[in-house]
Image (tube, rainbow, N blue to C red):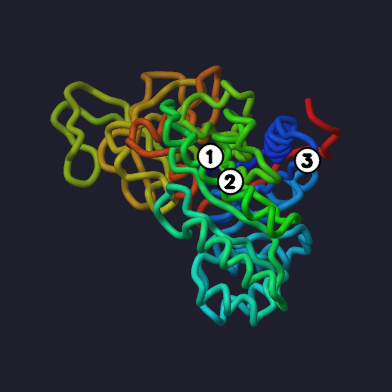
């Protein structure tokens, strides 16, 4: 039997959901506060260019990425919003960033001097408690003075929260106080500096963190920063990931399914074969643990997942060859959230969507936008 009209692994990305989420986040912001949509890791697996354009339409005025090639990709696509590259870069990459009119982050005197010589637009990074890249307040003021001396240009002061997505707020508020103090000292010397620290979680939970700009990543994609139900904040998940039922068979008691014989039937069991596996970005640790949705039925992933295929337990009736298999999304009143998968794997929703591999085709849906719903 030849099955037509299905793709083996496709991530459907709803651009109207992206627009809704960006508009919702922007509505939380005061006055002239800007929204930076974070598009690193190919838009958290959703497609940076398509998401970037949708975010622009809905009110994002900046874009954030992690690497210089990610910035170049946006420029090659004709996107002309300010782009900030968060991550480290080599000297050669610095000049590529400047050529792409992308702004850079500095946290050492050596790199600040290199950025000054290259004529870069610079954001100084304060380590307010994240404990990765960044400097203390005195050093931040020193790096800002280097950037402001020209031919480089001082644009911003930034930091990053370590615990904004956690219920306990003590350290979050400590970081906010440290950043606010440094921002005040920075503004006394450089009144036009753009001060920003808030991520998605801080944007949604603490207006005092908003500053001059917020940098929202996970919430743009309709995912909850605390790995709970995104409905809590009115967010709309943008990704729906699907495959199809390519085959079925009945295994008898004592017969096994898959590598390592990790599933052995105790009774006659109807097994479905789905042409998707960990090579498409579905975590192998979901073997014998995760579910998929087929025609509204919740079906357990059964046996060891392969690179290109997996097997699932089917109901005795109600699922047919060619039926859509939903890995993330809704079907027949049932749903599987990224957050559900993340909790099962003891990880975060960021990882679930970012792991969807390039072999999975992205398809974009979304009518022309007429404003927030």
Q: Which residue is mark 2?
A: 197
Residue 120: mark in rendering: none
* Front residue of 120 and 93: 120
Q: Which residue is mark 3?
A: 58
70 relative to 249, above or below: below
Circle 3 residues within 10 Å: few <14, some 14–19, many ≥20? many
Spatial CA distance of label 1 from label 3 is: 28 Å
Disc 1 + disc 2, Cβ < 8 Å:
yes
Mark 3 lies on a secondary structure that is: helix
* Front residue of 359 and 373: 373
Disc with the residue nearer the chain's start (1 vs 2): 1
316 relative to 154, above or below: above
Circle 2 residues within 10 Å: few <14, some 14–19, many ≥20? many
257 relative to 270, above or below: below
* Front residue of 129 and 296: 129
Spatial CA distance of label 3 from label 2 is: 22 Å
Q: Which residue is mark 1?
A: 176
């Amino acid at each position: 039997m030849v099955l037509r009209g299905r793709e083996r692994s496709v991530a459907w990305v709803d651009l109207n959901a992206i627009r809704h989420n960006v508009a919702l986040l922007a509505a939380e912001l005061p006055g002239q506060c800007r929204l930076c949509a974070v598009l690193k890791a190919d838009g958290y697996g959703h497609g940076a260019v398509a998401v970037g354009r949708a975010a622009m339409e809905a009110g994002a005025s900046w874009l954030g990425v992690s690497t210089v090639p990610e910035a170049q990709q946006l420029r090659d696509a004709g996107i002309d919003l300010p782009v900030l590259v968060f991550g480290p870069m080599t000297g050669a990459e610095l000049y590529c960033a400047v050529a792409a009119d992308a702004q850079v982050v500095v946290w050492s005197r050596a790199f600040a001097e290199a950025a000054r010589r290259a004529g870069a637009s610079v954001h100084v990074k304060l380590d307010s408690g994240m404990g990765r890249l960044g400097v203390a307040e005195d050093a931040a003021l020193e790096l800002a003075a280097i950037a402001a001396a020209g031919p480089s240009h001082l644009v911003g002061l930034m930091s990053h929260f370590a615990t904004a997505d956690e219920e306990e707020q003590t350290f979050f508020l400590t970081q906010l106080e440290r950043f606010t103090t440094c921002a005040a000292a920075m503004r006394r010397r450089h009144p036009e500096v753009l001060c920003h620290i808030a991520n998605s979680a801080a944007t949604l939970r603490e207006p005092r963190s908003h500053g001059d700009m917020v940098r929202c990543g996970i919430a743009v994609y309709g995912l909850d920063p605390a790995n709970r139900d995104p409905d809590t904040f009115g967010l709309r998940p943008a990704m729906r990931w699907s495959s199809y039922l390519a085959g079925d068979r009945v295994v008898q008691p004592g017969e096994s399914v898959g590598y390592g014989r990790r599933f052995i039937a105790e009774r006659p069991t109807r097994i479905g074969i789905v042409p998707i596996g960990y090579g498409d970005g579905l975590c192998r640790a979901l073997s014998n643990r995760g579910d998929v949705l087929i025609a509204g039925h919740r079906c357990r992933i059964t046996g060891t997942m392969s690179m290109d295929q997996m097997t699932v337990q089917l109901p005795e009736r109600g699922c047919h060859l060619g039926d859509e298999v939903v890995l993330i999304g809704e079907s027949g009143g049932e749903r599987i959230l990224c957050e559900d998968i993340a909790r099962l794997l003891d990880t975060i929703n960021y990882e679930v969507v970012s792991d969807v591999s390039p072999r999975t085709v992205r398809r974009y849906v979304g009518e022309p936008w007429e404003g927030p719903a």
